[in-house]
């Protein structure tokens, strides 16, 4: 019985690091460095200051492509501030049912 419990704890502890996602400050990197980190890790959380609310920190999950998103989500191009650019192009996950008004074409 002790061997089964020990084996279960060993398996659980080995799986825990795989579930972790790295967190970074986007202003610590250039755009190229931030993109390299995202490409290497497939998904990361970046924190950056809000442009609208003073002293507010925002967090977002950035991914390499749609394969890093949950089912029912897709990779959508977005922008984040970095050390060298205020608009570094990256990808975030959005629901497949989420349509922006400017993307929806309704014929007259």
Image (tube, rainbow, N blue to C red):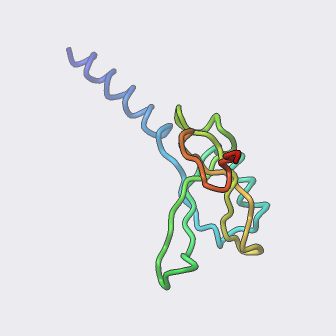
Residue at image point 73% right, 69% down: 87
Residue at image point 70% right, 45% down: 107
Residue at image point 69% right, 41% down: 65
Residue 10: image x %, image y %? 37, 28
**54 shown above or below 27:** below
Report the front residue among 106 and 29: 106
**97 shown above or below 88:** above
Residue 29: image x %, image y %? 70, 68
Q: Quadrant of the N terminus?
A: top left
**36 shown above or below 29:** above
Judged left or right of residue 104, residue 31 is right
Residue 24: image x %, image y %? 58, 62
Report the front residue among 94 and 34: 94
Judged left or right of residue 6, residue 76 is right
What is the residue that sits farthest to the front in this orientation? 108
Number of numbered discs visible in the structure rendering: 0
Residue at image point 77% right, 74% down: 84
Report the front residue among 16 and 107: 107
Residue 74: image x %, image y %? 62, 40
């Amino acid at each position: 019985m002790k061997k089964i419990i020990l084996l279960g704890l060993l398996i659980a502890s080995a799986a825990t690091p795989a579930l972790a996602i790295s967190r970074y400050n986007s202003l610590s990197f250039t755009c190229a460095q931030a993109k390299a980190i995202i490409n290497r890790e497939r998904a990361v959380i970046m924190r950056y200051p809000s442009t609208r609310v003073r002293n507010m920190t925002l967090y977002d999950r950035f991914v390499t492509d749609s394969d890093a998103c949950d089912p029912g989500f897709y990779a959508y191009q977005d922008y984040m501030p970095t050390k060298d650019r205020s608009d570094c192009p990256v990808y975030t996950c959005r629901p497949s049912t989420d349509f922006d008004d400017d993307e929806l074409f309704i014929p007259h």
